[in-house]
Image: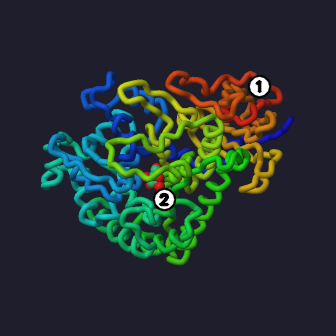
């Protein structure tokens, strides 16, 4: 039997839990918008054409921000196409996803949907095919109260109150050669700086995100962040990180340890940002917006035949997640939480149908993927401060990351209670976890759940939506506190 232990002490504070860690992402891609959040004619559609079943699951997921409208899509997007009477909106080619965009949903519908979902909108601007002027126009349309052509147009389109969008992404993945309007770091850094400067003339209080690297394996990784921040340091608040992981060649051990790469990514970007800050003699600190992260079987997408037609809302990137995906996903969430001192915003990419925790059938059912559960549980129970837990754990050898601990965990603590989020990466047996919570003064385990399955590749489907769901963990001892974590499992242990 594997044995591990950890210590929960409110004195080991990392940072406050950031609600924006639980952000997500809605892109005009595949069926995320059309037949995802929006489907007029669906039996559950509301007066705006939004699916109520998806809204209900979105609220249950507990999201904070929603990044929109892309993603790669934004780099060719004309926001004006998506406002005004729907029957006059143009249909356009979407080069990013080889699709036809009908523009039935645009910024006004998106913000309306966010209000219904209890979420904060986070807007990305097009710095691929467009630039400063279009960014300023969109900002004025969204946020200016009234009395200008664009703000009055918003009111005429039904949104009298300003959308009051605070967080803005200055483009998307501009380091990627696949991006429409891809740029070098210097080119992008200059454009981002001048766009940020102009946007701050409209509203100095905006929170602006400069594009970092599309992954830590990009050839320009590190140099890109340094050059972009040299141009933008005083003008932005965040640098972005994007990372996707998948199980490759049946190497489950490496896959379950993929958060090791996310940890390396975060540390490297923090070090690079702080280095630029030191060189600029700046007292300001740049935080990370990890605004795309998830499990994504990207290799399947890349190996598929390239499309020849231009469909509306095709089935794209509809990965069906299994238990092991959810456990690897849980490890990524633990890593984001554990780095809350510098990762102060994040967006799970994406929300519905497209590499998503929520799936839908057009005209039919909506259900939860396995990855829904770690996100919903962490969003619900992470509160107060994030704590270091000083784990002592056996390790195992992985091909990609060398020696990695079997236990991966983080705790949060508030007046209302303390919660431990823990993953057992072992595929060959349970992990007996001893919890030293003496510093909490007589607290007991009030709830322990585990997400696991005898088959690590078990999935949820529309017919069997609860095959993989959190269940009460029966293997709990109170004195000393001990919980048996099943092999390949995500666990939530609440003390009160
Ligand atoms: O989330 C899917 C895609 O992944 C996004 O459009 C892009 O930004 C990233 O490469």
Vertical comparison of 310 with 466: above or below: below
- Where is residue 197 drawn, in percent x and y? 33, 68
Discs 2/1, front: 2
Vertical comparison of 290 with 53: above or below: below
- Where is residue 126 drawn, in percent x and y? 33, 60
Cα gap from disc 2 to disc 1, whole angstroms: 40 Å
Query: Which one is in front, 42 or 435?
Result: 42
Which residue extends farthest right?
1
- Where is residue 245 drawn, in percent x and y? 59, 50
In the picture of the structure, the residue carrying the numbered disc 2 is 240
Please name the residue shown 13% across and 43% down the image. Answer: 156
Q: Which mark is residue 476?
A: 1
Q: Secondary structure at mark 1?
A: strand
- How is this picture coloured? rainbow
Query: Which one is in front, 25 or 255?
Result: 255
Q: Secondary structure at mark 2?
A: strand
Label 2: few (<14), some (14–19) or many (≥20) C-alpha neighbours in 10 Å: many
- Where is residue 77 drawn, in percent x and y? 30, 55
């Amino acid at each position: 039997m594997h044995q591990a232990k950890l210590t929960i002490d409110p004195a080991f504070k990392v940072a406050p839990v950031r609600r924006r860690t639980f952000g997500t992402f809605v892109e005009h891609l595949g069926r995320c918008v059309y037949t995802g959040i929006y489907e007029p004619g669906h039996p559950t559609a509301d007066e705006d054409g939004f699916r109520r079943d998806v809204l209900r699951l979105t609220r249950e997921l507990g999201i904070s921000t929603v990044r929109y409208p892309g993603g790669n899509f934004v780099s060719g997007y004309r926001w004006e196409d998506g406002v005004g009477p729907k029957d006059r909106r143009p249909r356009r080619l979407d080069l990013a996803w080889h699709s036809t965009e009908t523009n039935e949903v645009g910024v006004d519908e998106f913000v309306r949907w966010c209000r219904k979902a209890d979420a904060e909108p986070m807007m990305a601007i097009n710095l691929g095919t467009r630039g400063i002027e279009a960014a300023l126009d969109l900002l004025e349309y969204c946020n200016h109260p009234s009395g200008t052509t664009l703000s009055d147009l918003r009111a005429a389109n039904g949104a009298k109150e300003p959308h009051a969008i605070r967080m803005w992404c200055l483009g998307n993945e501009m380091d990627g050669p696949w991006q429409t309007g891809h740029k070098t770091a210097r080119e992008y850094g200059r454009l981002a700086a001048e766009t940020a400067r102009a946007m701050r003339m409209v509203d100095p209080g905006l929170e602006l995100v400069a594009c970092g690297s599309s992954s830590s394996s990009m050839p320009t990784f590190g140099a890109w962040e340094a050059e972009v921040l040299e141009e933008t340091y005083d003008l932005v608040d965040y640098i972005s990180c994007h990372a996707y992981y998948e199980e490759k060649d049946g190497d489950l051990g490496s896959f379950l340890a993929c958060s090791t790469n996310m940890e390396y990514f975060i540390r490297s970007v923090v070090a690079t940002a702080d280095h630029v800050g030191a060189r600029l003699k700046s007292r300001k600190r740049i935080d990370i917006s990890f605004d795309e992260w998830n499990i994504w079987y990207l290799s399947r997408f890349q190996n598929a035949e390239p499309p020849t037609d231009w469909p509306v809302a095709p089935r794209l990137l509809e990965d069906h997640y299994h238990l092991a995906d959810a456990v690897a996903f849980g490890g990524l969430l633990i890593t984001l939480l554990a780095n809350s001192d510098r990762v102060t915003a994040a967006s799970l990419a994406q929300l519905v149908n497209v590499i998503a925790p929520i799936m839908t059938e057009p005209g039919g059912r909506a259900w939860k993927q396995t990855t829904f559960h770690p996100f919903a549980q962490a969003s619900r129970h992470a509160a107060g401060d994030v704590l270091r837990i000083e784990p002592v754990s056996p390790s195992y050898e992985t091909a990609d990351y060398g020696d990695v601990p079997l236990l991966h965990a983080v705790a949060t603590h508030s007046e209302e209670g303390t919660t431990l989020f823990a993953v057992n990466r072992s595929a060959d047996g349970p992990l007996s976890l001893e919890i030293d919570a003496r510093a909490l003064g007589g607290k007991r385990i009030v709830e322990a759940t585990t997400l696991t399955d005898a088959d690590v590749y078990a999935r949820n489907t529309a017919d069997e939506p609860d095959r993989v769901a959190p269940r009460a963990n029966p293997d709990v001892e109170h004195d000393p506190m001990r919980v048996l974590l099943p092999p390949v499992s995500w666990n939530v242990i609440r003390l009160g």
